[in-house]
Amino acid sequence: MKACEITPKSAVPGIVWPALPHPEGAAMLAVQYQLEQSQWWSPERLQEQQFHQLQALLTHAVTTVPFYRDRLPAAGFKPGKPVTPEQFHHFPILHRKDIQAAGNRLLSTQLPRDHGKVYSGKTSGSTGRPIQYSGTELAQFWWRAMTLREHLWHQRNFAGKLAVIRVNVKNGNHENWGIPVANVFETGTSAVLDIGTDLGAQLTWLQEQNPDYLLSYPSNVLALAKACISKGIRLENLREIRTLSEAHNPELRAVCREAWGVPVTDIYSANEVGYIAFQCPEHEHFHIQSETLFVEVLNAQGDTCQTGEIGRVVITTLHNYAMPLIRYEIMDYAEVGEACPCGRGLPVIKRVLGRQRNLITLPDGKQHWPSMGYGKWYGIAPIEQIQLVQKNLQQIEARLVMPRPLTPDEQTRIIPILQKSLGYAFQISFSYHDEIPRSASGKFEDFISEIDANAGKQSGDVASNQS
Amino acid sequence: MTSYSTLIPKSAIQSVVWPSMPGANAALMLAMQYQLEKSQWWSEDLLRAKQMEQVGALLKHAYHSIGFYRERLSAAGYTAENPISDATWQAIPILSRSEIQQAGDALLSSQIPASHGQAAESRTSGSTGRPLKTYDTGITQLFWFTLTLREHLWHKRDFAAKLGIIRYWADSSANPPSGLHLPGWGPATDVAFHTGPSSVLSINSSITQQVEWLLREKPDYLLTHPTVARALAEHFIEHKIPLLSLREVRTLSESLPHDLRALCQQAWGVPVVDMYSSREAGYMALQCPEHQHYHIQSENLLVEILDVNGMPCAAGQTGRVVLTSLHNFAYPLIRYEIGDYAEVGKPCPCGRGLPVIKRIMGRVRNMMQLPGGEQRWPILNYNAYREIVPLRQLQLIQHSADNIEVRLVIERVVTPGEELRLAEAIRTSLGYPFTLNFNYCQEIRRSKSGKFEDFMNEIPDHA
């Protein structure tokens, strides 16, 4: 049965359908009711509503958050007065270093009681600059509401089994899919495995679990899919792969189809801001979650990118009153997409290209996100994992995980393939590793540049050969 | 023009403007709307399957807590352990109004679940003579509100606008000339949305008072009985008075005359949106947002339209309306024949799977009988009658198979020639040469609940 045909849990004896949900379930459905409507609004109307909420948030920030007390009025904001998109566009960008420097000055001194308790966390620092963030129970409610929206968008069958392989989790089995769904609907069971688990053990676990849905990181899914293809393992119940946290390898979808005959649904999120964009239910691009965030994609000059342009992602959280993030540059790059034929007015991100540090810099100063399709070198050598590190404008280190070193012949065949996909005849050296660790957030980056992150910004010329 | 802000639900958290964070009651109401938004598009089969799940819970409760039903259900082959089959369902006898009247509190559950709220007595108007006493619960009230709100949302009403209501009002607060002024549209909408004001005028007011009230109050929407809307529309047309504020006429409580839509278009240039409800069962069918027929409210009740043999009518056939209220655990109505006739419609091109009623014909007592025994729904052609005499009110009472009393309220004396022509026009529209007795009245009164019926069959033993 599709998600739209499943009756919510009823809290009243005798009332089976339509359900009378308990208060938490009702609150969640009341929000879904609104989200069902707002997704079809025009971008203009969505923005109008966002700015109503922004006005409330900015007023709160100026009056209760020391960091913003002078910063926003200096940029022209008057508390309690409407703010226009043009004015907002001239508010200063909040960089990670600003957040680090501000410390507690970014915390509200007078959080409204009805926003609930405050929680804190720390980003992984995969960008080299970990930040402390705080949120509220209300912000968490929105996180959960959006989690449920994503499930509903993709019409998941809640009776199925969900398997999760990710970071910072305790291995085990659970009765349901977790609070966001289980507060509203009856669900099947879920099983969780730490991403640190050896790939072979992950495969055995997956075969035992035989899940309907698998949620993990793209790099891990890619490795699992490749292993399943080479060992001829099918996961009979599997219906869909869900990925999060990393920029997609362009071949991931094709490999998952080959391995298991299933589609991949990607999620773009970050701990400090929540869900940023979800894959469209009908297409492979993403819809910005405009009901909880105001997202800008800006070019090198700080202007709004047009359709087809790639720019920096800048985010304003609409409901986090404990630590408002106003025009926060999250250090991701994304390509602005054209309006979606599905009819949803939620703006489209065609691709999330990854972080600044995943950009390769060519000797002429041009930058792009390199694409390293595994299909190109797969079959030449038994490579299990690869990570390329740009040391300088001429040299790339290829870190490999494989049972034995490459033979000279294999090296000779692989080097031109890598050079071609990088877009320049770099000098390539090989190093061998037992494993290439993930970041604390579980992210795996298959390309890391060690060149000064700002070097490429000067050129203002960001392109991508990823397709 | 619908303004955006009125469609954003009320937020219980002041600092969160959008999307709204509704309070507990509002959240429940919106959670219901969320479900109804989905279920309206389900196939008839899926709707039926969900209904039967709920019917299963209802029958189990009725079987265990109401002796009347235990006997009745057992006799039909029902056992609480097994899912109910179509055959068992069909074997459950139809419950007539007189059986309910006779059974009285014997139909009241001895174990109403505490979470359903207190059972509250409810009496129908008794326009048929004897009032019907049933019981509601908090849950049935919630469903009533839920469907009230659905009806508004279906028809995309602007909640910021002003609602005018002319209907039966239990106390004197809505009496003419001033009527009653309320800050909102009522609990069903106000729980979740900000609404504009509403003004209420008791239906026990004269047409002159109603016209004055309308011109003074200038409502955007007018909710009233079809006969009131007709009288008002005729008045506005005749006196060429504009009522520019009006956007829509909403009707309830009486069957809709075939010419009312055209009259309201002519008088005010507005559409009519009709609904089919009853005191004892709530909303039964609401007008489709895109068409003039009705969608059965399958989430609230199971409606069967049965032919003389007790079999379901096919599209195009007219039959008796038999309903089962799905959520009344205080006073369950299981296969209750409400006394109305309706024509089954084809599936709606709007895509909603909620079954279609093409027309609600009215009560058995509104059916005309011909001397040969044939029964028909009478057609009255007010336009033709008005071309002959300045008619203010008309009511036909059938006393025997060939004799009909014509009650008339007319502003002046009618000449014998006019009466002859009127009689001929009435016979033509009824399609039979009845003997007509004219009876000139000062006023023809409505029933206590405000209903006005223009054809009453009072032949003794008329079913």
Image: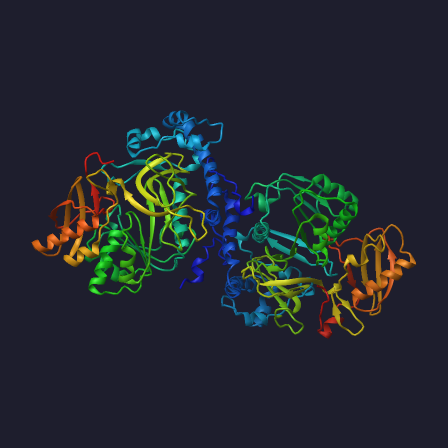
User: Where residue A434 sits in the image (x, y, percent)?
Assistant: 85, 51
Q: Identify the image quadrant of the N terminus of chain A.
A: top right
Q: Residue at x 29, y 45 (%)?
A: B361
Question: Can you say whether B446 is above or below B178 in the image?
Answer: above
User: Where residue A82 sits in the image (x, y, percent)?
Assistant: 50, 68
Q: Identify the image quadrant of the C terminus of chain A.
A: bottom right
Closer-to-camera residue (B320/A449): B320
Is residue B120 something one can see in this rendering?
no
Q: Residue at x 63, y 62 (%)?
A: A105
User: Where residue A219 sits in the image (x, y, percent)?
Assistant: 74, 54
Residue most toward the front?
B372
Is residue A322 something one can see in this rendering?
yes
Question: Can you say whether B127 is above or below A103 in the image?
Answer: above
Picture quadrant of residue A103: bottom right
* Total labels drawn: 0
Q: Residue at x 51, y 59 (%)?
A: A40
Q: Is residue B61 left or right of residue A221?
A: left
Q: Residue at x 42, y 37 (%)?
A: B116
Closer-to-camera residue (B243/A264): A264
Residue most toward the right?
A408
Closer-to-camera residue (B442/B382): B382
Closer-to-camera residue (A193/A415): A415
User: Where residue A374 sits in the image (x, y, percent)?
Assistant: 78, 57
Check the image and tell me how it is coloured.
rainbow
